[in-house]
Image (cartoon, rainbow, N blue to C red):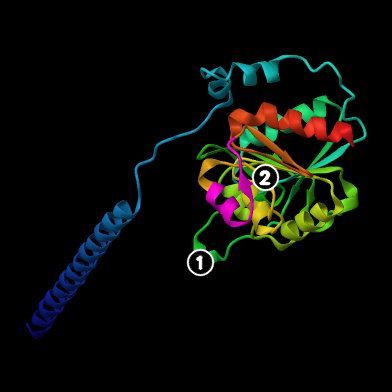
């Protein structure tokens, strides 16, 4: 009888233990659900609704008022050797405005020039920043259309590998992120300063003239740029002209993607005269 009682007592104890464990698991699970729900609520408040704003090439070329820009790209280039023997460096980082690089580069190559894409050395942000870069960021830079990332282009060399004697001209496309990345890079700024001293052509479009401001080469110069940065160019000592393209000595500047044709022809004209 005592044995049976002991067995019954042990069974009851085991059941109670299981019930207690299950209760603890239930409490823990509920706590986890509560924490997850709270974290999800916070993340939702930290995030914004996804939407796309971009500037497709076809939309730009077909927009009313851009007929001349469309003709610039669709009219076959007659003199395929106008810039033969000329070598142009495109200085660019992530966040460049697509048409402001691909447009002039296409035109310069059509004229027979050799063009190289030059980027700062890849320097990933610290892990705690929470940024995720694709593997191709080691060899490519990212293009945008207005505010939307749209693709990647492979670069040929990094800024620490180039010399002034390598090129006849330097060209910097815009895009708000690209110049901001370039103006912080010591190799880029030193190269632009040395290139300016050589008297060779430096061309910059849209937001890109702020790189020239960071290089401190705008004092007493006439130039233009995207409307949002014109005060920065003025503060750097430049005189701002509201024109599609401005040439002052060895510096050519433009304002916007709609000025790509005028900008490209101005670079062509400068190089032909030299």
Q: Up-down: is 147 above or below 215?
A: above
Label located before the other in sequence (1 or 2): 1
Extreme-bottom residue of the structure: 2
Crowdedness near tag 1: few (<14), some (14–19) or many (≥20) residues, C-alpha within 10 Å: few
Query: Residue 273 lies in what quarter of the image?
Result: top right
Crowdedness near tag 2: few (<14), some (14–19) or many (≥20) residues, C-alpha within 10 Å: many
Q: Is residue 114 left or right of residue 152?
A: right
* Residue 253 falls within the magenta-colored stretch: no
Which secondary structure, mark 2?
A: strand
Q: Is residue 23 left or right of residue 262?
A: left
Of 230 and 153, which appears nearest the observer? Answer: 230
What separation in Å lies between label 1 and label 2 (alpha carbons)?
A: 43 Å
Q: Up-down: is 7 above or below 157?
A: below
Extreme-right residue of the structure: 85
As drawn, the label of residue 272 is: none
Residue 212, percent from left and from top? 68, 52
* Residue 240 falls within the magenta-colored stretch: yes
The residue under label 1 is: 128
Which secondary structure, mark 1?
A: helix
Span of residues in magenta: 230-242
User: Which residue is painted at 62% across and 60% down in the image?
Assistant: 124
Residue 249, percent from left and from top? 78, 44
The quadrant of the image that shows the N terminus is: bottom left
Residue 160, percent from left and from top? 79, 58
User: Which residue is painted at 66% across and 53% down in the image?
Assistant: 211
Of 252 and 136, which appears nearest the observer? Answer: 252
Query: Residue 75 lies in what quarter of the image?
Result: top right
* Of marks 1 and 2, the one in the foreground: 2
Of 108 and 123, which appears nearest the observer? Answer: 108
As drawn, the label of residue 222 is: 2
């Amino acid at each position: 009888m005592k044995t049976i009682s002991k067995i019954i007592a042990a069974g009851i104890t085991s059941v109670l233990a299981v019930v207690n464990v299950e209760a603890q698991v239930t409490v823990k699970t509920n706590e986890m659900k509560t924490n997850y729900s709270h974290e999800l609520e916070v993340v939702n408040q930290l995030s914004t609704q996804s939407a796309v704003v971009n500037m497709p090439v076809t939309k730009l070329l077909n927009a009313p008022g851009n007929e001349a820009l469309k003709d610039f790209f669709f009219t076959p280039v007659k003199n395929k050797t106008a810039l033969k023997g000329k070598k142009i460096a495109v200085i660019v980082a992530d966040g460049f405005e697509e048409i402001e690089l691909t447009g002039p580069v296409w035109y310069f190559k059509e004229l027979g020039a050799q063009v190289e894409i030059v980027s700062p050395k890849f320097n990933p942000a610290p892990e705690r920043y929470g940024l995720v870069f694709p593997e191709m960021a080691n060899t490519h830079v990212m293009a945008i259309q207005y505010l939307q990332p749209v693709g990647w282009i492979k670069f040929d060399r990094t800024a620490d590998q180039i010399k002034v004697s390598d090129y006849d001209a330097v060209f910097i496309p815009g895009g708000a992120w690209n110049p901001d990345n370039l103006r912080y890079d010591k190799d880029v700024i030193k190269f632009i300063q040395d290139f300016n001293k050589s008297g060779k052509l430096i061309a910059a479009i849209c937001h890109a003239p702020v790189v020239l401001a960071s290089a401190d080469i705008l004092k007493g110069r006439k130039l233009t740029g995207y409307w949002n940065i014109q005060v920065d160019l003025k503060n750097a000592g430049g005189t701002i002209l509201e024109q599609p393209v401005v040439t002052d000595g060895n510096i050519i500047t433009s304002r916007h993607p709609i000025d790509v044709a005028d900008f490209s022809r101005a670079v062509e004209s400068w190089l032909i005269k030299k």
